[in-house]
């Protein structure tokens, strides 16, 4: 008897049987645009071999005007079909099934050619879309149908039609973006005509033996969004038009509510799928912030959905399902929903990868082959860089000893884990701990590694991390360091935080909260962000009602720009909005004069003022901790220096883990 009987139960779709209830959700990786189809095939085949019940590809454009960006991949020619055939063959050979997502971006298309129901610019795009006439709409339908037919020719087992997240089909549904008064606008009957017509014609064109998933928005989280009654009406019409499965979409891309970030509670939106399920006869798939087999099993066992969709967790671990099925769930590398190497990369035009798994989308390039000449390897520092180096080196057959002066592994990850909204880091630390325990790595914790301890090793890796920068402010002996604060030191009611980088933001978040973290209390989190019920307010928006802040906080930096500009591309706005909601006063252009018993004396715009705070917390960046590396070099030993010990600026766990993995792959 498996621990996950619901998750691992097959699902019969009539003409085809899915081997389990796990859908690998659609993600744009950027791989198709590299033109290296062997690499695309390797990425998906690894996930098929790892047990995903059904894979959905990244969104493919049905035509040029509907591409998310100019040059976005699609199925436009025979060559495209042949390329996609390599992917579907590889997935089938690995025992999987794969559907292609057809994504028409409408007004979200990043290009002058973009089209939409009405000429209304989106707040997240500089382009005003062209309003389609009846003929133009007909062309879009034909192009989507053609894409579906080509997908079948390319060997896909089905298609997913993207009808949520505020993309083209979703734009027709709501008055927010559809101001038409012809057959495609006005009444809801008319506004939903396009998605229903698309599904009907796709089904007609591909025949009955082809999976057709429709991704439906259950809560738009934008003003004037769909009401629950409309969602149900659409779902039933989509079913009648021939869809095999309904997948859940949550929130438009322009919504000002986080929907997948790490601070969103796990399974935060499954209550909506649970409500839809009894309204339709086809299986419904739930999604958003489901990242462990336990959560997936719980949701399915509670009858909230027929399948769970996980996307980013398949970047973190291609073998998610296989490990769950083999009773090795604790070995699943956890997606911590940080977006740092996936969505942040996508939106910066970089290839996707994963903070916890640098091999994601790099399967053919970063390969851990057994070492031909195993060596004795010392790794000093059991933070993310050191732990990853040790694990990969041991996997390759090296004899590894991992040193840390602390009694436990994890390094600075423990600091992140103590911040409200970053609880997922606890799972990452636990995973590293499990993997180290089950590896051949010898752990030497609780003792400083001295240069003489390292003399007998053939390779020495220094991953000693960082130390707080000394900002040299008069009276700073009165201040606390971020290390003290995040490790639980008492802090007064009014606090100035010096430095508005990632850690200054984290510390501020820590200081304004007390009691339960909203991430661990769904009702509280919904109040904080104003997530209501689409049955009560169209689009599901409610007035945010955040708890009063636990402290009064000033978050300061010297640069004149707006604090938080350097935060993650897709998550920075969430951190800024969360602190603003707690009344944090974010100030740039500040110079620090002195820390006195009265508070913090600063100068801003040529005027001095005392911020009347009880405590000042220093978050002024970090410097490399290289003393051991320097001592070894003086002894004539050349170590490999990685992570923060190598470069402290802009250090984050993504770079540390990636550098550790790549070094270990080459040792
Ligand atoms: P950081 O991002 O480099 O920020 C350091 C802050 O200190 C800046 O606001 C800087 O602003 C200020 N500063 C620098 N020198 C100073 C000086 N001499 N006196 C006073 N202030 C000074 O470093 P961090 O906050 O320590 O974070 C380290 C890294 O951890 C980040 O780069 C980030 O990648 C990672 N991290 C990321 C997140 C995340 O949300 N993704 C969260 C935590 C940590 P001014 O120079 O303008 O004063
Ligand atoms: Fe998850 Fe972060 Fe990896 Fe993206 S980069 S898949 S969010 S762990």
Image: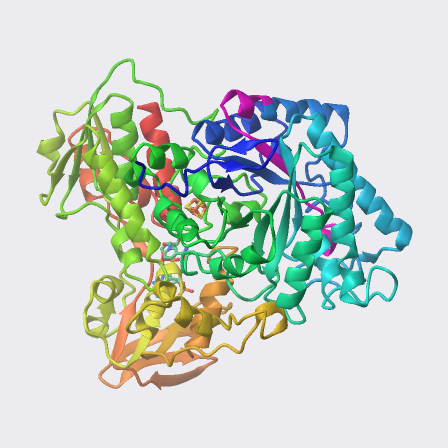
Residue 295 relative to residue 574: left or right: left
Q: How is colour applied across the structure in the image?
A: rainbow
Please tell me in which quadrant of the rendered image residue 57 appears: top right
Which of 447/20 is in front?
20
Residue at 19% in and 71% down: 477
Residue 349 painted magenta = no
Residue 345 relative to residue 33: left or right: left
Q: Quadrant of the C terminus?
A: top left
Please tell me in which quadrant of the rendered image residue 179 appears: bottom right
Camera sees residue 109:
no
Residue 630 relative to residue 294: left or right: left
Which of 300/349 is in front?
300
- What is the x, y in percent for residue 531? 51, 70
Camera sees residue 538:
yes
> Considering only vertical position in the picture, is 523 above or below 394?
below
Q: Quadrant of the N terminus?
A: top left
Residue at 74% in and 39% down: 203
- What is the x, y in percent for residue 304? 47, 55
- What is the x, y in percent for residue 192? 75, 58
- What is the x, y in percent for residue 182? 88, 63
Residue 97 painted magenta = yes
> Considering only vertical position in the picture, is 488 above or below 2?
below
Residue at 53% in and 20% down: 93
Q: Quadrant of ligand 1?
A: bottom left
> Considering only vertical position in the picture, is 163 above or below 563?
above
Which of 36/437 is in front?
437
Residue at 43% in and 56% down: 267
Tell me how many marks there are.
0
Residue extent of the magenta highlight: 89-111
């Amino acid at each position: 008897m498996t621990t996950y009987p619901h998750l691992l139960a097959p699902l019969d779709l009539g003409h085809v049987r899915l081997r389990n209830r796990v859908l690998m959700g659609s993600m744009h990786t950027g791989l198709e645009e590299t033109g290296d189809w062997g690499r695309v095939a390797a990425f998906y085949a690894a996930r098929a071999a790892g047990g995903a019940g059904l894979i959905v590809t990244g969104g493919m454009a049905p035509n040029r005007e509907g591409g998310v960006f100019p040059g976005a991949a699609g199925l436009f020619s025979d060559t495209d079909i042949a390329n996609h055939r390599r992917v579907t063959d590889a997935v089938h050979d690995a025992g999987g099934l794969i559907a292609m997502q057809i994504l028409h971006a409408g007004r979200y298309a990043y290009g002058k050619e973009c089209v939409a129901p009405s000429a209304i610019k989106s707040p997240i795009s500089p382009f005003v879309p062209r309003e389609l006439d009846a003929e133009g709409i007909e062309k879009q339908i034909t192009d989507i149908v053609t894409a579906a037919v080509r997908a079948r020719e390319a060997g896909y087992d089905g298609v997913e039609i993207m009808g949520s997240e505020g993309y083209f089909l979703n734009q027709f549904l709501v008055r927010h973006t559809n101001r038409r008064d012809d057959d495609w606008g006005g009444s809801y009957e008319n506004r939903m005509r396009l998605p229903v017509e698309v599904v009907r014609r796709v089904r007609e064109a591909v025949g009955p033996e082809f999976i057709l998933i429709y991704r439906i928005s259950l809560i738009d989280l934008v003003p004037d969004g769909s009401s629950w009654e409309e969602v149900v009406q659409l779902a039933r019409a989509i079913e009648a038009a021939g869809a095999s499965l309904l997948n859940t979409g949550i929130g438009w891309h322009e919504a000002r509510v986080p929907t997948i970030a790490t601070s969103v509670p796990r399974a935060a939106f499954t209550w909506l799928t649970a409500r839809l399920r009894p309204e339709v006869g086809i299986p419904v798939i739930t999604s958003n912030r489901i990242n462990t087999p336990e959560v997936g099993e719980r949701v399915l066992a509670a009858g909230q959905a027929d399948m769970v969709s996980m996307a980013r967790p398949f970047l973190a671990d291609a073998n998610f399902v296989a490990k769950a099925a083999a009773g090795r769930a604790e070995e699943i590398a956890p997606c911590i929903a940080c977006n740092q190497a996936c969505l942040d990369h996508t939106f910066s035009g970089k290839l996707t990868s994963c903070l916890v798994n640098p091999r994601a989308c790099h399967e053919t390039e970063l390969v851990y082959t057994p070492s031909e000449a195993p060596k004795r390897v010392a790794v000093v520092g059991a933070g993310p860089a050191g732990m990853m180096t040790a694990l990969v080196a041991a996997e390759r057959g090296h004899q590894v000893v991992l040193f840390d002066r602390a009694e436990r592994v994890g390094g600075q990850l423990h600091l992140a884990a103590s911040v409200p909204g970053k609880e997922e880091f606890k799972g990452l630390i636990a995973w590293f701990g499990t993997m180290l325990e089950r590896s051949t790595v010898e752990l030497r914790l609780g003792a400083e590694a001295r240069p003489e301890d390292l003399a007998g090793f053939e390779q020495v890796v220094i991953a000693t991390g960082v130390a707080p920068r000394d900002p040299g402010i008069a009276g700073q002996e009165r201040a606390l360091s971020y290390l003290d604060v995040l490790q639980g030191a008492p802090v007064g009611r009014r606090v100035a935080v010096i430095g508005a980088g990632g850690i200054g933001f984290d510390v501020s978040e820590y200081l304004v909260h007390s009691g339960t973290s909203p991430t661990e209390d769904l009702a509280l989190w919904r109040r904080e962000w104003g997530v209501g019920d689409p049955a009560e307010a169209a689009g599901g928006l409610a007035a945010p009602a955040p708890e009063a802040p636990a402290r009064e906080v000033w978050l300061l930096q010297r640069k004149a720009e707006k604090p938080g500009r350097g935060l993650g591309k897709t998550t920075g706005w969430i951190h800024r909005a969360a602190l603003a909601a707690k009344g944090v006063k974010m100030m740039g252009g500040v110079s620090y004069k002195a820390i006195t018993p009265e508070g913090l004396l600063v100068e801003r715009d040529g005027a001095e003022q005392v911020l009347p705070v009880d405590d000042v917390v220093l978050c002024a960046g970090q410097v490399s901790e290289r003393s051991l590396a320097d001592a070894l070099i003086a002894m004539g030993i050349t170590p490999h220096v990685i992570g923060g010990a190598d470069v402290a600026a802009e250090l984050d766990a993504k770079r540390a883990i990636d550098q550790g993995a790549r070094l270990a792959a080459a040792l």
